[in-house]
Image (cartoon, rainbow, N blue to C red):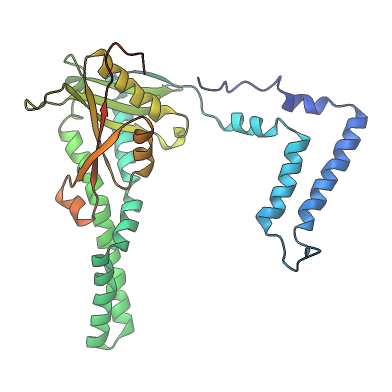
Amino acid sequence: MEPDSNAGLSDPTFSQWQRPASSWAKAERHTLKQVSLFLQGWKPCRHSRRFLSLPQAWRKGVQGGLALFPGLSDFRHRSLSMAPYHIRKYQESDRQWVVGLLSRGMAEHAPATFRRLLKLPRTLILLLGGALALLLVSGSWILALVFSLSLLPALWFLAKKPWTRYVDIALRTDMSDITKSYLSEHGSCFWVAESEEKVVGTVGALPVDDPTLREKRLQLFHLSVDNEHRGQGIAKALVRTVLQFARDQGYSEVVLDTSNIQLSAMGLYQSLGFKKTGQSFFHVWARLVDLHTVHFIYRLPSAQAGGL
């Protein structure tokens, strides 16, 4: 359950401000003591000439403040919490939100892909080796530097291309008509997480059409959560929704694909019981930047077992 954003007015944090005058005197002396501890962080220690670092000195003062107001840390957490959300089936009025989440979510991975691309041996050989060869031929440092810098926009284009390509393919296939793709037949569905009348998360599920499979398999697609609403358990709740749906529909396995740079996503899936089954390149652009698609599977227990 999401924390109540209006909670706190009756918490111990606020009762601290109702202290009698004698308590305020003690509080003032205690606070001055903590400030003194903070300032001592910049003085040499008695048995050492080293100075305490700023984080160490600050930590002393903060710990004293939390000791004076024990409810302060809980209040800070509540004040930063997001509004409650609920998960429901997709509606046509959600399309603009869903497409926006898909596009922004994929674009967020371009910087990490760019950094990964810069670390590849072939990229370093191109940037450094090409510049060195040009320097030896021309004798100009400026020309060599311009050559290396001129390659960076091209590398950034390569880093973005797999993600824009993924969005283009999705908008031409299953996401072109979400209702038709996910909600027109039994055994598939598309959900959104809604908070304050805004769609802040999405996930879809389609049956795997492979006659060679012995087990009935469902594939999870398009798990995405708005950047401002992450860390609230929305992604985990969406995945659990898919797993419960799979159980209710009689599926034996749930599969999904993610990329090797989406470390938080892989951690989430593994924490829920998904297992890696392999990796591949979903497109030539991904191969150029060494962007692997990682495959996961979740084997559902017997339908007679308890809920997820």
> In the image, is residue 2 above or below residue 255?
above
Q: Is residue 39 above or below residue 302?
A: below
User: Which one is in front, 273 or 222?
Assistant: 273
Image x and y of residue 167, in percent: 23, 39
Q: Is residue 9 left or right of residue 226?
A: right
Left of 74 or right of it: where is 161?
A: left
Q: For the view shown, which residue lies furthest in the bottom direction?
A: 139
- Is 74 left, or right, of 34 in this rendering? left
Horizontal and vertical percent for residue 61? Answer: 74, 47
Residue at image location 19% in from the left, 56% down from the top? 288
* Image quarter (top left, top right, bottom left or bottom right) of the C terminus: top left
| Extreme-right residue of the structure | 22
Residue at screen point 71% across, 60% down: 52
Instruction: Report whether 111 appears left or right of 69.
Output: left
Quarter residue 150 falls in = bottom left
Spot occupied by residue 304 in the image (x, y as percentages of width and height) = 29, 11
Residue positioned 6% across, 25% down in the render: 211
Question: How many marks overall?
Answer: 0
Farthest residue to the top: give it: 304
Q: Quadrant of residue 296?
A: top left
Report x, y in % for residue 64. 76, 42
